[in-house]
Image (tube, rainbow, N blue to C red):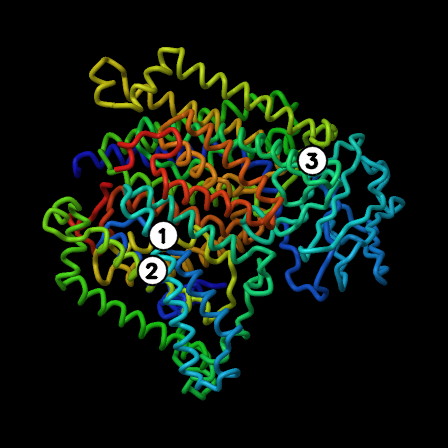
Amino acid sequence: MDFLSIINSAASEILSPTTAAFALATIGLNIHFGYSGLLNFGQAGFMAIGAYAFAIFTMMVDPTATLGWPVWLSFIAAVLVAVVAAVIFALILGIPTLRLRGDYLAIVTIAAAEIIRFSVRTQDLTAITGGSQGLRGADYKGDFDAMNPLTGTTYGFGPWTATAYDTWVRIVAWSLVIVALVLVWLLMRSPWGRVIKGIREDEDAVRSLGKNVYGYKMQALVLGGVLGAVAGVMFVLPRAVQPDNFATTMTFYIWTALLLGGAATVFGPLLGSILFWVLLSFTGGVINLLHGMGVFGDMSGSQAGQIRFVLIGIALMVLVIFRPQGILGNKKELSFNV
Amino acid sequence: MKTSSRPQRRGLRRVIAVALAVMGMVAGGATAVAAAPLPQTEQASPYNFNGIIRDGQTPVEGVEITVTGNGVDETVATGADGRWMIGVPSTGTYTVSIDTSTLPEGLTLRDPSFESREFEVGGSTAVGVLFPFGPSTGGSPGADPGTGSSGSPGSGEAPAPGDGETPGGTSDTGASSNDFGSQLLARVISGLSFGLLLALAAIGITLIFGTTGVNNFAHGELLTFGGIVFYVTTTLVNWPAWIAVVVTLIASAALGWAHDWAIFKPLRRRRVGLVQVLIVTIGLSIALRYFYQFLIGGGTYGLSVERGDVLQIGPVLMRTSGVVSSAIAIVVLVAVGLFLTRTRIGKATRAVSDNAGLASASGIDVDRVIRIVWVLAGLLTGGAGILYTYFIGANIKWDVGFTILLLLFAAVTLGGLGSAFGALVGAIIIGLVTEISTLFIAPDLRYAIALLVLILVLLFRPQGILGRRERIG
């Protein structure tokens, strides 16, 4: 692996569907943490809910085959199922915790996300969720593939070449990212957004103005969670559903991306997600190169590759201490006091 | 803020230097251990038996295993990595036997009756079969065939009833008979010992939270650190167990001190917000965890420590190691309780937990108390790391602490954040809930049940069992 191919694979991450899915989840988290000040450490749980609800609905109900629905309707129905599941999950999470202090919400959301992961990977539900093996991509991609208007073999150029199916995933995923960005931009300059930001700054002040703080927080939690669920759907379209993809680590990476780009900004989550994946791919390539040169002795390549996750951890620490507002953010817009 | 950033930068460099120095001693021996390959995920048959034949650390190649029953009669030899797997088409009872003549010279089964055993294939798709070898070889029975598939604690194997080994489970405690009463008693005892270990680690979290307000998400890594140093000293460099324990405890206390010196004290100086510190601990957790994996690899490694015989107490089977670790945990917990209530420093610690400003005004050196709390937390959690690796079957994995981190938080929150005695109560409840729930639901869901209990308690009594109302905001 030479240096040029490292650059190439890092550049290809800019447009990859995974980056798009990640950006959607980060935009959702931005609504939670950046704008509303909610410490949601369970964004991976929302993604898992979305991914599993979408895949299981498509496989079990399969409206295209059983009800004769057109493929686009089945797909949208499956996405709606994912959204509804995320709304229910957000309500269950929010009712007990949104009245408590912020770090309780952190512990409850992280616990709830893990409950989701343990539940979908348990052997008792193997018939539905596939257990620890997860679900095969081919079992739920049919509708989405059938909607694909692209007929060629490959599209794009340079590092951004992809098969027709991958290109189709990219178009849809990135369109959703743009829609989400516009939505956040419009919402946050609306009266609703001002109340949300007010709650972040001073909950009691907003309450004294007669606003239902609890209700607003719940709306923000639901909205960000729905974006997380849609992100989960986009995340599994190019791959299979694997329960351990939705572990706590995923949530932490989303946080890293958000803090890198800048919380409480419209484009911060997008920039952060792109940079996160590009840098991850780049450092992975460099470590691989060094490993090939024998820098790590007789250590296996995958073991040496762990260094890049060490770097993520250090980067997160340094970032939050020295530049908590990230690249695009404004320090005054941050809520770091519970 | 800007002016104080220079000393902070130095502080951060110190973090890395200390981390590297402390781990440096781990690195030498550990790098040679290659990551164990993941078990096969594609299975032709719906059910299978599998396992690893190992003599201590070395996989043994060419050992023949036979599975018979329900029309199956299949023999395989272990591969170069010591692994074997035999698929079977349906549920039912099968006999799994090992051809002892294919074992290398000097390697004998610890229990000769294990040469041929019957297993039931039921709810789970994969059954891990262990063949522990005799003490004459010093080999450890820590082969854990259920791991490798993921970073999650429950790896999908139902415990084979009555054989004294529970692959993928947390403990070796089992019932000698199958009636519900003795099963329940066995789970209760197992839950109590698990809870005691959790308490040992959770008290560190709660003391740190009480004195500094920090939710330390890197606490699991303190536990893993204890386990890893113990693994390196006993297994890779073959020191006697007592020296290994002493070295581990010193190293863990030093790591706790280094946490405060290099990271948390500078952060207090900078008056960094608590949520920022919380995210710093998350970063620290990621960095340390993957650093451990970088050092020892991604597999599960057996420790070459003697785990003692299986004892039968009434209807309950327990390993000596389980009894010993529970006893040690009780002694240490009593000592911590006496320390907190009887000594000056202990009283000062509780005073700082109550109200740091008032404690400071009445002449208590808050920084010193916090440093002592960090050292104590490192020591207790490192000790818990030794006992926990011992308890789960004398093996170590890079993320062992992280997998139980949420259980620790559940214990602490249940008992009431900031209350040391609450943490003890919470940990015992969590231990009991996880173990007893396995009687009713799949064992791989037992951590989920514990977390569900956490959420339900927050719903009805947010301050926790022993907590006070004003903490919840």
The disc placed on residue A225 is 2
Q: On the picture, is A210 further left or further right than B136? A: left
The disc placed on residue A93 is 1
Rendered residue at 15%/55% (across/down): A195
Whether residue B193 is situated above or below residue A324 in the rendered picture? above
Q: On the picture, is B61 further left or further right than A75? A: right
In space, the residues marked 1 and 3 are separated at their CA atoms by 37 Å
Marks counted in the figure total 3
In front: A123, or A141? A123
Q: Residue B148: where, in percent of width, then height?
A: 61, 51
In front: A134, or B41? A134
Q: Residue B173: where, in percent of width, then height?
A: 67, 35
The residue singled out by tag 3 in the image is B182
* Label 3 environment density (alpha carbons within 10 Å; few <14, some 14–19, many ≥20): some
User: Which quadrant would residue B144 be assigned to in this image?
Assistant: top right
Q: On the picture, is A293 further left or further right than B309? A: left
Hey, what amino acid is under mark 2? Gly
Asked if the residues shown at circle 1 and circle 2 are in contact, with their CB atoms under 8 angstroms apart, the answer is: yes
Hey, what amino acid is under mark 3? Ser
Chain letter of the residue beneath label 1 in the structure image: A
Q: On the picture, is B126 further left or further right than A256? A: right
In space, the residues marked 2 and 3 are separated at their CA atoms by 45 Å
Sequence-first disc among 1 and 2: 1
* Label 2 environment density (alpha carbons within 10 Å; few <14, some 14–19, many ≥20): many
Question: In this rendering, do the residues under marks 1 and 3 share a single chain?
Answer: no
Rendered residue at 20%/48% (across/down): A334
